[in-house]
Amino acid sequence: MRAFDGQLSGSRPISRTVEEKKRQLRDLKEALAALKPHAAASLRQSLTAKIKALETELAAR
């Protein structure tokens, strides 16, 4: 569902705890490893970019 104008959750990023971020990182790595060889390159790139972003965010803590 889309947020309506003035709704608090409309443009606010989802805040996650460190444990949730670690779990998401693990899940993304598993998903990348499970991709078939014929999967779209853009999908691989987006997963790799998200993994990198999470790793740098967790390393900064």
Image: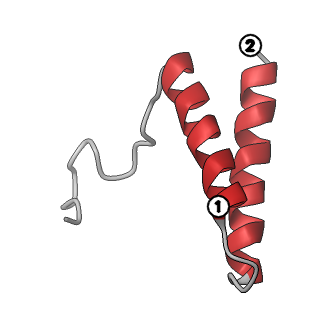
Q: Residue at x 68, y 47 (%)?
A: 29
Percent position (x, y) of residue 41?
77, 80
- Badge 1 element: helix
- Residue topped by disc 2: 61
- The front one of 53 and 44 is 44
Q: Residue at x 77, y 57 (%)?
A: 48
- Residue topped by disc 1: 34
- Which label number is shown at residue 3? none
Q: CA distance from mark 1 to mark 2?
A: 29 Å
Quarter occupied by the C terminus: top right
Q: Locate residue 15: give its quadrant.
A: top left
Q: Is residue 55 left or right of residue 5?
A: right
Amino acid type at mark 2: Arg
Residue extending furthest top? 61
Quarter occupied by the N terminus: bottom left
Amino acid type at mark 1: Ala
- The front one of 14 and 46 is 46
Percent position (x, y) of residue 38?
72, 86
Q: Earlier in the sequence, mark 1 or mark 2?
A: 1
Q: Residue at x 56, y 18 (%)?
A: 18
- The front one of 45 and 15 is 45
Q: Locate residue 27: give its quadrant.
A: top right
